[in-house]
Amino acid sequence: MAKAEGKSFEFLDESHIDPSLLEVFDFDSSKQYIKTETDEFSAVCPFSGLPDIAYVKIEYFPTGHKCVELKSLKYYFVSFRNVGIYQEAATKRIYSDLLSALGSKQLMVTTIYNIRGGFQTTCVEGSLD
């Protein structure tokens, strides 16, 4: 819970992020580059209780012979909506959950958060090497 000027904002903890929502399908083309983007990601800043909104780019080669199903990815992202998590930790969590689901070592997650307080934050986790 964050407090500001006598008001408090309640939010959920990270246990409410649900990686079981991620569904994958078999795909045998480890040389194909896949990029998925959305500007509809949101979570809650655990310091202020205010929403953090970001553009997310997921890039990978399906070396684990799996692709992520997009509707399931959307539901997974929605599970972050009321969770208090720092921007850097959200990026790392998305990367870790996708790494587990896809089994690909060539995976990179980039988040670019909306400007707040004059700062724009970009976080990158992983590598395509």
Image: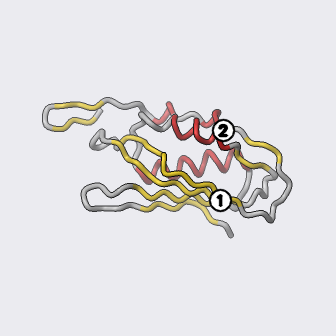
Whether 10 is drawn above or below 73: the answer is above
Numbered circle sitting on residue 81: none
Q: Nearer the viewer, residue 88 or 120?
A: 120
Image quadrant holding the C terminus, namely bottom right
Give coordinates of residue 58: x percent, y percent.
60, 56
Q: How many numbered marks, from 0 up?
A: 2
Report whether 48 appears left or right of 73: left
Check disc 1 and report the residue beneath it.
35
Q: Which mark is nearer the camera, 2 or 1?
A: 1
Whether 72 is drawn above or below 27: the answer is above
Which residue corresponds to the image point at 66% horizontal and 43% vertical from the top-left? Answer: 70
Q: Earlier in the sequence, mark 2 or mark 1?
A: 2
Check disc 2 and report the residue beneath it.
22
Which residue corresponds to the image point at 50% horizontal and 32% vertical from the top-left? Answer: 15
Q: Quadrant of residue 126?
A: bottom right
* Residue type marked 2: Leu
* Residue type marked 1: Lys
For label 2, the crowd category at 10 Å Cα-Cα, with few meaning under 14, some 14 to 19 and many 20 or more, is many
Report whether 80 appears left or right of 33: left
